Amino acid sequence: MHSLGRRILAGFITIQIVVVAFFLLRNPFDQVKGFRNIVQQLNVGNILSRSNFSNYENTTQQSTFKDTTQQSNFKDMPQSSIAVKTDISKVTTETNNRPLTAPVTSLPVQKPIVKYAEYPYRTYNVTCRTVSQTLRNTPFTPDDAKNVLEWYKSVDDYFKPHRTDPINMPEDEGENLFLNYDYNKPSSHTLTDANFQYFHFDGDKISCYKRGTADIRSQPNGTTCICHQEFTGKLCSVPKTVENSRKNVKRQYTFKPRKVPRRIIFAMTFNMEHIILYLKMIQNAPAVDLFVLLESNFTNYGDPKPLYLLPVLKRGFMRRWHGKIMHMFTSEFLQQARQRGKGFEQENHIRGLFAPAIKQRVSNVRDDDLFLYFDADETPGLDELLFLKLHDGYPVPVGFHMILCRYGLYWWDEKVKWRAVGVAPMKMFLDVYSGHANILRGHTGIRKNKRIKNFGSDPLHEVWNLGSEANCVGWHLSPSGTPGQVFTKIMSVINADWPRFADNPVNRNITYIASLFRRGRFFDLKHDCVAICPRELPQFKDLGYIFKYPNYFNYLLVNPNLFIP
């Protein structure tokens, strides 16, 4: 009996040896695969360590070929990632001049660690107004100037066009749609209707405006909208700044909410106003459907320059809005604009490039969609833009009274009143203004422009400026940023906008520019600006983001030149 058992056991072991030998006669990849399967079937996989398995592969394949791909995979993977799965992908190598094809082992891939550019933020525990008034007349010492300029330079370096490390601003999430963008192959865009409901609805009937309504009360004859303090109207859809602007026109107009909002195309030229553009996007993106951003490799003065916008878009800057951005590039510069007094020809030429590009690259544009043109440092109020988007019955074109700030959000130039016309329905922009942003922007007269008279007798054709000199509905930051950015701005100005401050050598000194920051004086030296705190002004109420992350924007919120970082 015992002898019979021994024979049966010996026979079973012999069969296993024969099976193993069969697998060992196959090609090297099958040797490994077959051995692994046998081990798993024999339920001994739990004792086969990664090192043992790797050693087995090395010794059994040594005489045939060296599987460097699999060796490097095992070497690079963490010790915990040793689970092996067979993939259907193939590799081909050579063994004795014979091609071998076998499944490749698929291993979990580690997600690469992205090293973002480090933003040079700082924290300042000071009050803006008090420090501004106290230290504005304190002169720089040489060490002070050196330290403050080094600090500003760190901000400038963050946006240098030669850098490729990714940019990661707080909450700036989304796909980088410009990572591989080529301006020689410009993108196309299609306007679509917003899927966001700006109004409450009572059946098919428009009811209270969500942004302007504090409460909704049911009444026997319908609902009553209780407005927030800043809004008025039956549906709480009219900002009081808009209602107060009725007196700016001669006629009476009836505002009617729209069930289908207009789409807004906002066009502007870009030089190097990175953070200012970021603030504009924060404030205006909720109302705008497409931003058309034009940059050139020439300044408006005619000097060659690098592109400053596209490189940072490629690095992921503003990626949460990439789907709303149409980048434009031009290398055209009119040589005659270099001559003294003829610089406006270049500005006029640049502002005429938008309409052809929009016609070519943007589809599904309706006649009553709105075209906007403002400079990169001019930003309309959000509530006012939403009103224009969501209503009919107001006069056009539309302009904005804007508060003018110098160097940052801490100096208000109260002596200079800033108003810019830049809004018109698309059909009006194309037919009345010939698709030329410069003509639209220059329209400041009331019913005196022959272009409007030739367009017809539409009573809505009347220039309407929102806000007033005392109650602005937007902001203009010029010049602003860092001393280096201000230097770039004044050097880029057309050869006609008098006085051209860059023509004075004193104004081209960076230390002198920094001293103007500290003093709160513009280049003309006519008067001091008024110290302000942006948190307290309604013009900046939609910039809560920068107050939430002040470390990133303190050099705009508080004058760094008033104390040495």
Image (cartoon, grey):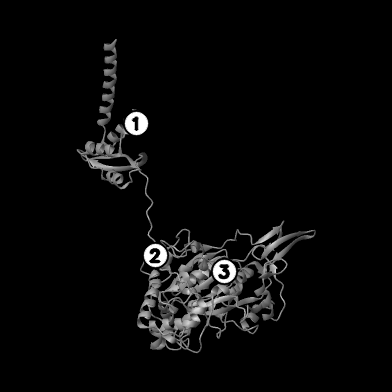
Q: Quadrant of residue 248?
A: bottom right
Q: Quadrant of the C terminus?
A: bottom left
- The relative height of residue 15 versus residue 263 in the rendered view (above or below) is above
* Along the viewing direction, whichever of 15 and 367 lies nearer the viewer: 15
Of the numbered discs in the image, which one, if any, rests on residue 118? 2
The type of residue carrying mark 2 is: Glu
Q: Are marks 2 and 1 in contact (CB under 8 Å)?
A: no
Residue at x-position 44% and y-position 86% = 501
Residue 471 locus on image (x, y percent): 62, 78
Q: CA distance from mark 3 to mark 1?
A: 64 Å
* Residue receiving disc 1: 40
Q: Residues within 10 Å of mark 3 (few under 14, many from 20)?
A: some
Q: Residues within 10 Å of mark 2 (few under 14, many from 20)?
A: few
Q: Could you say whether the residue bearing mark 1 is in a helix, strand or loop? A: helix
Q: Residue furthest left?
A: 63
Residue 209 locus on image (x, y percent): 67, 64
Camera sees residue 479: yes
Residue 97 locus on image (x, y percent): 21, 40
* Residue receiving disc 3: 542
- The relative height of residue 250 versus residue 368 in the rendered view (above or below) is below
- The relative height of residue 395 versus residue 415 in the rendered view (above or below) is above
Give the mark nearer the N terminus: 2 vs 1.
Answer: 1
Q: Quadrant of the N terminus?
A: top left
Q: Residue furthest top?
A: 1
Q: Are marks 3 and 1 in contact (CB under 8 Å)?
A: no
